[in-house]
Image: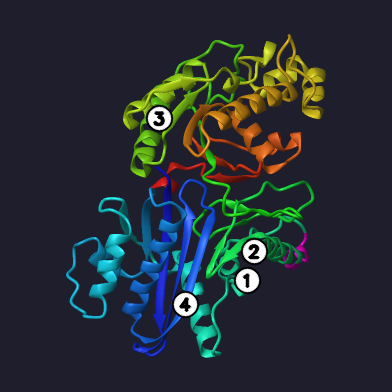
Amino acid sequence: MREFIVEADGGSRGNPGPAGYGSVVKDAATGQTLAERAEYIGVATNNVAEYRGLLAGLRAAHELDASASVHVRMDSKLVIEQMSGRWKIKHPSMKPLAAQAATVFPPGRVTYEWIPRERNKHADRLANEAMDAGGRGEQWTPSASRAELDAAVIPEPSGPPGDAAAGAARARAALADVRAARTVAGATARGTPAAAAPGTAPAVSDQAGGAAETSAPGWGSGPDLGAPATFVLLRHGETPLTPQKRFSGSGGTDPALSGVGRDQAERVAAALARRGTVQHVVASPLTRTRETAGIVADRLGLEVTVEEGLRETDFGAWEGLTFAEVRERYPDDLNAWLASPDVAPTGGGESFADTAVRVAAARDKLIAAYAGRTVLLVTHVTPIKTLLRLALGAPPESLFRMELSAASLSAVAYYADGNASVRLFNDTGHLR
Protein backbone atom coordinates (compact mmCIF):
# COMPACT_ATOMS: atom_id res chain seq x y z
CA MET A 1 0.00 0.00 0.00
CA ARG A 2 1.34 3.41 -0.94
CA GLU A 3 1.69 5.95 1.90
CA PHE A 4 1.31 9.73 1.69
CA ILE A 5 2.26 12.49 4.10
CA VAL A 6 -0.24 15.34 4.26
CA GLU A 7 0.93 18.58 5.85
CA ALA A 8 -1.76 21.22 6.28
CA ASP A 9 -2.21 24.63 7.86
CA GLY A 10 -4.64 27.51 7.92
CA GLY A 11 -4.61 31.08 9.15
CA SER A 12 -6.84 34.04 9.79
CA ARG A 13 -5.71 37.65 9.94
CA GLY A 14 -8.04 38.83 12.70
CA ASN A 15 -9.49 35.49 13.95
CA PRO A 16 -12.05 35.83 12.54
CA GLY A 17 -10.72 37.75 9.58
CA PRO A 18 -9.42 37.21 6.05
CA ALA A 19 -8.40 33.54 6.03
CA GLY A 20 -6.76 30.92 3.87
CA TYR A 21 -5.34 27.43 3.98
CA GLY A 22 -2.44 25.50 2.51
CA SER A 23 -1.86 21.77 2.06
CA VAL A 24 0.93 19.67 0.61
CA VAL A 25 0.93 15.95 -0.21
CA LYS A 26 4.26 14.11 -0.19
CA ASP A 27 5.28 10.57 -0.98
CA ALA A 28 6.18 9.02 2.37
CA ALA A 29 8.88 6.82 0.88
CA THR A 30 10.74 9.52 -1.05
CA GLY A 31 9.62 12.82 0.45
CA GLN A 32 8.72 14.02 -3.05
CA THR A 33 6.08 16.76 -3.21
CA LEU A 34 3.17 15.37 -5.22
CA ALA A 35 0.49 18.05 -4.81
CA GLU A 36 -0.02 21.52 -3.37
CA ARG A 37 -3.38 23.08 -2.52
CA ALA A 38 -4.11 26.59 -1.25
CA GLU A 39 -7.18 28.84 -1.22
CA TYR A 40 -8.39 32.15 0.14
CA ILE A 41 -11.69 31.39 1.91
CA GLY A 42 -12.91 34.84 2.96
CA VAL A 43 -13.61 35.70 6.58
CA ALA A 44 -13.17 32.75 8.95
CA THR A 45 -11.40 31.69 12.15
CA ASN A 46 -7.96 30.09 12.38
CA ASN A 47 -9.45 26.72 13.31
CA VAL A 48 -11.93 26.69 10.43
CA ALA A 49 -9.10 27.54 8.03
CA GLU A 50 -7.00 24.72 9.50
CA TYR A 51 -9.84 22.24 9.00
CA ARG A 52 -10.29 23.44 5.42
CA GLY A 53 -6.58 22.84 4.86
CA LEU A 54 -6.83 19.32 6.27
CA LEU A 55 -9.84 18.51 4.09
CA ALA A 56 -8.13 19.84 0.95
CA GLY A 57 -4.97 17.85 1.68
CA LEU A 58 -6.87 14.61 2.22
CA ARG A 59 -8.85 15.12 -0.97
CA ALA A 60 -5.67 15.80 -2.94
CA ALA A 61 -4.13 12.58 -1.56
CA HIS A 62 -7.30 10.67 -2.47
CA GLU A 63 -7.11 11.97 -6.05
CA LEU A 64 -3.54 10.67 -6.30
CA ASP A 65 -4.31 7.19 -4.92
CA ALA A 66 -7.59 6.28 -3.26
CA SER A 67 -6.08 3.04 -1.92
CA ALA A 68 -3.20 4.75 -0.08
CA SER A 69 -2.71 5.27 3.64
CA VAL A 70 -2.15 8.80 4.90
CA HIS A 71 -0.19 10.29 7.78
CA VAL A 72 -1.35 13.83 8.58
CA ARG A 73 1.04 16.29 10.21
CA MET A 74 -0.21 19.66 11.46
CA ASP A 75 0.84 22.24 14.02
CA SER A 76 -2.77 22.66 15.19
CA LYS A 77 -3.11 20.76 18.45
CA LEU A 78 -6.87 21.25 18.32
CA VAL A 79 -7.35 19.64 14.91
CA ILE A 80 -4.98 16.76 15.63
CA GLU A 81 -6.57 15.91 18.98
CA GLN A 82 -10.12 16.23 17.64
CA MET A 83 -9.50 14.15 14.52
CA SER A 84 -7.70 11.54 16.64
CA GLY A 85 -10.87 11.27 18.76
CA ARG A 86 -9.30 12.48 22.00
CA TRP A 87 -11.07 15.87 22.10
CA LYS A 88 -14.72 16.62 21.36
CA ILE A 89 -15.69 18.92 18.51
CA LYS A 90 -18.07 21.59 19.78
CA HIS A 91 -17.77 24.48 17.32
CA PRO A 92 -20.69 24.37 14.83
CA SER A 93 -18.50 25.55 11.92
CA MET A 94 -15.92 22.81 12.48
CA LYS A 95 -18.21 19.80 12.96
CA PRO A 96 -19.21 19.41 9.29
CA LEU A 97 -15.61 19.94 8.13
CA ALA A 98 -14.35 17.28 10.54
CA ALA A 99 -17.10 14.91 9.43
CA GLN A 100 -16.15 15.40 5.77
CA ALA A 101 -12.45 14.87 6.54
CA ALA A 102 -13.24 11.63 8.34
CA THR A 103 -14.93 10.17 5.26
CA VAL A 104 -12.31 10.92 2.58
CA PHE A 105 -10.43 7.70 3.41
CA PRO A 106 -11.79 4.63 5.22
CA PRO A 107 -11.32 4.54 9.02
CA GLY A 108 -7.91 3.27 10.03
CA ARG A 109 -6.12 4.47 6.90
CA VAL A 110 -5.37 7.96 8.28
CA THR A 111 -3.14 8.72 11.27
CA TYR A 112 -2.49 12.10 12.87
CA GLU A 113 0.62 13.70 14.37
CA TRP A 114 1.16 17.14 15.91
CA ILE A 115 4.36 18.87 14.79
CA PRO A 116 5.82 22.24 15.84
CA ARG A 117 5.19 25.17 13.52
CA GLU A 118 8.79 25.31 12.28
CA ARG A 119 8.33 21.83 10.78
CA ASN A 120 5.19 22.90 8.93
CA LYS A 121 6.72 25.73 6.89
CA HIS A 122 5.61 24.47 3.50
CA ALA A 123 1.89 24.39 4.32
CA ASP A 124 2.14 27.60 6.39
CA ARG A 125 3.67 29.46 3.46
CA LEU A 126 0.97 28.18 1.10
CA ALA A 127 -1.72 29.46 3.47
CA ASN A 128 -0.08 32.88 3.63
CA GLU A 129 0.28 32.99 -0.15
CA ALA A 130 -3.44 32.26 -0.47
CA MET A 131 -4.30 35.05 1.98
CA ASP A 132 -1.96 37.46 0.19
CA ALA A 133 -3.57 36.60 -3.15
CA GLY A 134 -7.04 37.07 -1.66
CA GLY A 135 -6.04 40.48 -0.35
CA ARG A 136 -5.13 41.47 -3.91
CA GLY A 137 -8.41 40.12 -5.25
CA GLU A 138 -6.61 37.26 -6.99
CA GLN A 139 -6.65 33.47 -6.91
CA TRP A 140 -3.63 31.56 -5.63
CA THR A 141 -1.76 29.70 -8.38
CA PRO A 142 0.97 27.07 -8.01
CA SER A 143 3.19 28.75 -10.60
CA ALA A 144 3.55 31.82 -8.40
CA SER A 145 4.21 29.87 -5.21
CA ARG A 146 7.47 30.17 -3.28
CA ALA A 147 6.34 27.80 -0.53
CA GLU A 148 8.49 24.86 -1.58
CA LEU A 149 11.57 27.06 -1.81
CA ASP A 150 10.93 28.90 1.46
CA ALA A 151 10.41 25.57 3.23
CA ALA A 152 13.58 24.15 1.71
CA VAL A 153 16.92 23.74 3.39
CA ILE A 154 19.56 24.97 0.96
CA PRO A 155 23.00 23.62 1.90
CA GLU A 156 25.72 26.18 2.39
CA PRO A 157 28.30 25.95 -0.38
CA SER A 158 31.71 24.67 0.56
CA GLY A 159 33.54 27.21 -1.57
CA PRO A 160 34.45 30.85 -0.88
CA PRO A 161 31.89 33.07 0.95
CA GLY A 162 31.03 34.81 -2.31
CA ASP A 163 29.61 31.53 -3.61
CA ALA A 164 26.67 31.63 -1.17
CA ALA A 165 24.51 33.95 -3.28
CA ALA A 166 25.32 32.02 -6.43
CA GLY A 167 24.47 28.72 -4.73
CA ALA A 168 21.13 30.06 -3.53
CA ALA A 169 20.41 31.43 -7.00
CA ARG A 170 21.17 28.07 -8.58
CA ALA A 171 18.91 26.35 -6.06
CA ARG A 172 16.09 28.77 -6.84
CA ALA A 173 16.63 28.21 -10.54
CA ALA A 174 16.49 24.44 -10.03
CA LEU A 175 13.22 24.71 -8.16
CA ALA A 176 11.81 27.04 -10.79
CA ASP A 177 12.66 24.45 -13.44
CA VAL A 178 10.87 21.79 -11.41
CA ARG A 179 7.74 23.93 -11.20
CA ALA A 180 7.86 24.81 -14.86
CA ALA A 181 8.02 21.11 -15.73
CA ARG A 182 5.02 20.12 -13.67
CA THR A 183 1.62 19.47 -15.13
CA VAL A 184 -0.74 21.84 -13.31
CA ALA A 185 -4.41 21.00 -12.96
CA GLY A 186 -6.56 23.51 -11.10
CA ALA A 187 -4.87 24.38 -7.84
CA THR A 188 -2.68 21.26 -7.88
CA ALA A 189 0.97 21.15 -8.93
CA ARG A 190 1.97 17.59 -9.64
CA GLY A 191 5.41 16.39 -10.63
CA THR A 192 7.78 13.48 -10.86
CA PRO A 193 11.40 13.76 -9.68
CA ALA A 194 14.26 13.54 -12.11
CA ALA A 195 17.81 12.40 -11.71
CA ALA A 196 20.36 15.17 -11.81
CA ALA A 197 22.57 15.22 -14.85
CA PRO A 198 26.21 16.28 -14.52
CA GLY A 199 26.47 20.04 -14.56
CA THR A 200 22.87 20.76 -13.59
CA ALA A 201 21.77 22.78 -10.59
CA PRO A 202 22.26 21.40 -7.06
CA ALA A 203 19.55 19.58 -5.16
CA VAL A 204 17.03 21.30 -2.90
CA SER A 205 15.82 19.27 0.08
CA ASP A 206 12.41 19.86 1.63
CA GLN A 207 12.15 21.13 5.20
CA ALA A 208 11.05 17.79 6.58
CA GLY A 209 14.25 16.14 5.46
CA GLY A 210 12.66 14.69 2.36
CA ALA A 211 13.94 13.67 -0.99
CA ALA A 212 16.19 15.90 -3.02
CA GLU A 213 14.38 17.49 -5.96
CA THR A 214 16.61 18.16 -8.91
CA SER A 215 16.03 19.47 -12.39
CA ALA A 216 17.67 18.79 -15.69
CA PRO A 217 16.97 21.00 -18.70
CA GLY A 218 13.93 19.80 -20.60
CA TRP A 219 12.80 17.59 -17.75
CA GLY A 220 9.08 17.08 -17.48
CA SER A 221 6.44 14.57 -16.51
CA GLY A 222 2.75 13.97 -16.82
CA PRO A 223 0.26 12.76 -14.24
CA ASP A 224 -0.01 9.26 -15.73
CA LEU A 225 3.40 7.79 -14.82
CA GLY A 226 1.93 5.82 -11.95
CA ALA A 227 3.54 4.89 -8.66
CA PRO A 228 7.32 4.41 -8.78
CA ALA A 229 9.26 1.32 -7.86
CA THR A 230 10.73 2.48 -4.56
CA PHE A 231 13.84 0.77 -3.24
CA VAL A 232 14.57 1.37 0.42
CA LEU A 233 18.28 0.61 0.68
CA LEU A 234 19.52 -0.88 3.94
CA ARG A 235 23.14 -1.57 4.65
CA HIS A 236 23.53 -4.68 6.79
CA GLY A 237 24.27 -4.41 10.51
CA GLU A 238 27.76 -4.53 11.94
CA THR A 239 29.98 -7.61 11.76
CA PRO A 240 33.15 -8.08 13.81
CA LEU A 241 35.06 -6.53 10.89
CA THR A 242 32.95 -3.37 10.58
CA PRO A 243 34.29 -1.31 13.53
CA GLN A 244 37.83 -2.26 12.50
CA LYS A 245 37.15 -0.79 9.01
CA ARG A 246 38.49 -3.84 7.22
CA PHE A 247 37.76 -4.67 3.58
CA SER A 248 34.89 -7.14 3.70
CA GLY A 249 33.56 -8.08 0.27
CA SER A 250 32.16 -11.14 -1.39
CA GLY A 251 35.52 -12.90 -1.59
CA GLY A 252 36.37 -12.97 2.10
CA THR A 253 35.28 -14.95 5.14
CA ASP A 254 31.58 -14.01 4.83
CA PRO A 255 31.19 -12.95 8.48
CA ALA A 256 27.89 -13.03 10.34
CA LEU A 257 26.44 -10.13 12.32
CA SER A 258 27.90 -9.26 15.70
CA GLY A 259 25.68 -8.67 18.73
CA VAL A 260 25.73 -4.97 17.91
CA GLY A 261 24.74 -5.73 14.32
CA ARG A 262 21.78 -7.84 15.39
CA ASP A 263 20.62 -5.07 17.71
CA GLN A 264 20.91 -2.58 14.84
CA ALA A 265 18.83 -4.84 12.63
CA GLU A 266 16.16 -5.14 15.33
CA ARG A 267 15.95 -1.36 15.66
CA VAL A 268 15.65 -0.90 11.91
CA ALA A 269 12.97 -3.58 11.84
CA ALA A 270 10.99 -1.73 14.51
CA ALA A 271 11.31 1.57 12.63
CA LEU A 272 10.19 0.05 9.34
CA ALA A 273 7.31 -1.74 11.05
CA ARG A 274 6.09 1.59 12.44
CA ARG A 275 6.26 3.08 8.96
CA GLY A 276 4.42 0.16 7.39
CA THR A 277 5.33 0.85 3.74
CA VAL A 278 7.70 -2.01 2.87
CA GLN A 279 5.97 -4.68 0.78
CA HIS A 280 8.86 -6.98 -0.15
CA VAL A 281 12.35 -7.77 1.18
CA VAL A 282 15.26 -8.64 -1.14
CA ALA A 283 18.76 -9.39 0.09
CA SER A 284 22.28 -10.01 -1.11
CA PRO A 285 23.31 -13.69 -0.82
CA LEU A 286 25.99 -13.01 1.82
CA THR A 287 25.45 -14.08 5.41
CA ARG A 288 25.39 -10.62 7.00
CA THR A 289 22.76 -9.30 4.61
CA ARG A 290 20.56 -12.40 4.75
CA GLU A 291 20.72 -12.28 8.55
CA THR A 292 19.81 -8.58 8.64
CA ALA A 293 17.03 -9.12 6.10
CA GLY A 294 15.69 -12.07 8.08
CA ILE A 295 15.38 -10.03 11.27
CA VAL A 296 13.52 -7.25 9.45
CA ALA A 297 11.33 -9.60 7.42
CA ASP A 298 10.28 -11.53 10.52
CA ARG A 299 9.13 -8.27 12.11
CA LEU A 300 7.24 -7.26 8.95
CA GLY A 301 5.74 -10.69 8.29
CA LEU A 302 7.43 -10.97 4.88
CA GLU A 303 9.62 -13.49 3.07
CA VAL A 304 13.18 -12.77 1.94
CA THR A 305 14.15 -13.10 -1.73
CA VAL A 306 17.86 -13.40 -2.52
CA GLU A 307 19.34 -11.44 -5.44
CA GLU A 308 22.88 -12.39 -6.49
CA GLY A 309 23.47 -9.03 -8.16
CA LEU A 310 23.31 -7.24 -4.78
CA ARG A 311 26.44 -8.91 -3.35
CA GLU A 312 29.39 -6.78 -2.28
CA THR A 313 32.44 -6.18 -4.49
CA ASP A 314 35.14 -8.88 -4.36
CA PHE A 315 38.22 -7.17 -2.89
CA GLY A 316 40.60 -9.97 -3.81
CA ALA A 317 43.79 -10.11 -1.74
CA TRP A 318 42.64 -7.08 0.28
CA GLU A 319 39.85 -8.98 2.00
CA GLY A 320 40.16 -8.72 5.78
CA LEU A 321 42.83 -5.98 5.63
CA THR A 322 42.55 -2.37 6.77
CA PHE A 323 43.19 0.46 4.33
CA ALA A 324 46.53 1.15 6.05
CA GLU A 325 47.57 -2.49 5.67
CA VAL A 326 46.69 -2.45 1.97
CA ARG A 327 48.63 0.79 1.58
CA GLU A 328 51.66 -0.84 3.17
CA ARG A 329 51.51 -4.12 1.23
CA TYR A 330 50.16 -3.05 -2.16
CA PRO A 331 50.84 0.70 -2.55
CA ASP A 332 50.97 0.79 -6.35
CA ASP A 333 47.86 -1.35 -6.74
CA LEU A 334 45.97 0.80 -4.26
CA ASN A 335 46.92 4.04 -6.01
CA ALA A 336 45.81 2.63 -9.35
CA TRP A 337 42.51 1.45 -7.82
CA LEU A 338 41.84 4.87 -6.32
CA ALA A 339 42.57 6.54 -9.65
CA SER A 340 40.30 4.46 -11.89
CA PRO A 341 37.02 2.54 -11.46
CA ASP A 342 38.27 0.07 -14.09
CA VAL A 343 41.11 -1.20 -11.89
CA ALA A 344 40.46 -4.28 -9.74
CA PRO A 345 42.00 -4.94 -6.32
CA THR A 346 45.10 -7.14 -6.13
CA GLY A 347 44.67 -10.86 -6.72
CA GLY A 348 41.72 -11.01 -9.11
CA GLY A 349 39.23 -8.83 -7.29
CA GLU A 350 36.34 -6.97 -8.89
CA SER A 351 36.61 -3.41 -10.19
CA PHE A 352 33.99 -0.80 -9.33
CA ALA A 353 33.15 -0.59 -13.04
CA ASP A 354 32.34 -4.31 -13.09
CA THR A 355 30.35 -3.93 -9.88
CA ALA A 356 28.34 -1.11 -11.45
CA VAL A 357 27.42 -3.26 -14.46
CA ARG A 358 26.26 -6.07 -12.18
CA VAL A 359 24.32 -3.77 -9.85
CA ALA A 360 22.65 -1.93 -12.74
CA ALA A 361 21.48 -5.23 -14.20
CA ALA A 362 20.04 -6.25 -10.83
CA ARG A 363 18.38 -2.84 -10.50
CA ASP A 364 16.67 -3.15 -13.88
CA LYS A 365 15.50 -6.66 -13.09
CA LEU A 366 14.04 -5.56 -9.75
CA ILE A 367 12.38 -2.44 -11.19
CA ALA A 368 10.58 -4.64 -13.71
CA ALA A 369 9.56 -7.13 -11.03
CA TYR A 370 8.38 -4.59 -8.46
CA ALA A 371 6.90 -1.72 -10.48
CA GLY A 372 4.79 0.50 -8.23
CA ARG A 373 5.91 -1.35 -5.08
CA THR A 374 8.10 -0.45 -2.10
CA VAL A 375 10.93 -2.94 -1.67
CA LEU A 376 13.59 -3.17 1.03
CA LEU A 377 16.96 -4.07 -0.51
CA VAL A 378 19.37 -5.32 2.14
CA THR A 379 22.83 -5.05 0.69
CA HIS A 380 26.32 -3.55 1.13
CA VAL A 381 28.27 -0.32 0.95
CA THR A 382 29.36 -0.52 -2.69
CA PRO A 383 26.03 -1.63 -4.21
CA ILE A 384 24.15 1.06 -2.27
CA LYS A 385 26.61 3.77 -3.24
CA THR A 386 26.42 2.56 -6.84
CA LEU A 387 22.62 2.70 -6.92
CA LEU A 388 22.70 6.23 -5.50
CA ARG A 389 25.45 7.31 -7.89
CA LEU A 390 23.61 5.99 -10.92
CA ALA A 391 20.33 7.59 -9.83
CA LEU A 392 22.02 10.95 -9.39
CA GLY A 393 24.07 10.74 -12.58
CA ALA A 394 27.21 11.26 -10.49
CA PRO A 395 30.69 10.27 -11.71
CA PRO A 396 32.38 7.04 -10.50
CA GLU A 397 34.75 8.94 -8.19
CA SER A 398 31.73 10.01 -6.12
CA LEU A 399 31.84 6.53 -4.53
CA PHE A 400 34.79 7.74 -2.47
CA ARG A 401 32.83 10.77 -1.27
CA MET A 402 29.95 8.92 0.36
CA GLU A 403 29.83 7.34 3.78
CA LEU A 404 27.21 4.82 4.81
CA SER A 405 26.94 3.74 8.42
CA ALA A 406 26.07 0.18 9.34
CA ALA A 407 22.29 -0.34 9.26
CA SER A 408 21.79 3.04 7.57
CA LEU A 409 18.90 3.68 5.20
CA SER A 410 18.57 5.45 1.87
CA ALA A 411 15.86 5.30 -0.79
CA VAL A 412 15.54 5.63 -4.54
CA ALA A 413 12.23 5.91 -6.39
CA TYR A 414 12.31 4.85 -10.05
CA TYR A 415 9.63 6.25 -12.35
CA ALA A 416 8.22 4.94 -15.60
CA ASP A 417 9.91 7.68 -17.65
CA GLY A 418 13.37 6.58 -16.46
CA ASN A 419 13.84 9.36 -13.91
CA ALA A 420 14.74 8.72 -10.29
CA SER A 421 14.55 10.52 -6.94
CA VAL A 422 16.98 9.91 -4.09
CA ARG A 423 16.38 10.22 -0.36
CA LEU A 424 19.12 9.83 2.24
CA PHE A 425 18.15 8.89 5.79
CA ASN A 426 21.40 7.43 7.20
CA ASP A 427 19.61 7.36 10.57
CA THR A 428 16.56 5.30 11.48
CA GLY A 429 15.41 8.18 13.69
CA HIS A 430 14.06 9.84 10.53
CA LEU A 431 11.56 7.02 10.18
CA ARG A 432 9.85 7.66 13.49
Tag 3–tag 2 contact (CB < 8 Å): no
Q: Amino acid at mark 3?
A: Ala
Q: Amino acid at mark 1?
A: Ser
Which residue sits at x=65%, y=44%?
A: 417
- Looking at the image, is mark 3 or mark 2 nearer the viewer? 2
Pick the residue in front: 163 or 364: 364
Q: Vertical placement of 368 versus 7: above or below?
A: above
Percent coordinates x, y for residue 173 in the rendering = 72, 64
Instruction: Say which quarter of the image contains residue 81.
Output: bottom left
Distance CA(mark 4)–CA(mark 2) = 19 Å
Lower position in the chain sequence, tag 3 or tag 2 = 2
Q: Residues within 10 Å of mark 2 (few under 14, many from 20)?
A: many
Q: Vertical placement of 135 versus 277: above or below?
A: below
Percent coordinates x, y for residue 278 in the rendering = 42, 37
Distance CA(mark 3)–CA(mark 4) = 45 Å
Q: Is residue 178 visible?
A: yes
Q: Which residue is mark 1?
A: 143
Lower position in the chain sequence, tag 1 or tag 4 = 4
Distance CA(mark 1)–CA(mark 4) = 14 Å
Pick the residue in front: 111 or 235: 111
Magenta span contains residue 238: no
Tag 1–tag 2 contact (CB < 8 Å): yes
Q: Residues within 10 Å of mark 3 (few under 14, many from 20)?
A: many
Lower position in the chain sequence, tag 4 or tag 2 = 4
Q: Which residue is mark 3?
A: 265
Q: Which residue is mark 2?
A: 179
Q: Vertical placement of 188 versus 232: above or below?
A: below
Disc 3 secondary structure class? helix
Q: Amino acid at mark 2?
A: Arg
Q: Which residue is mark 4?
A: 39
Distance CA(mark 3)–CA(mark 2) = 39 Å
The magenta stretch is 160-165
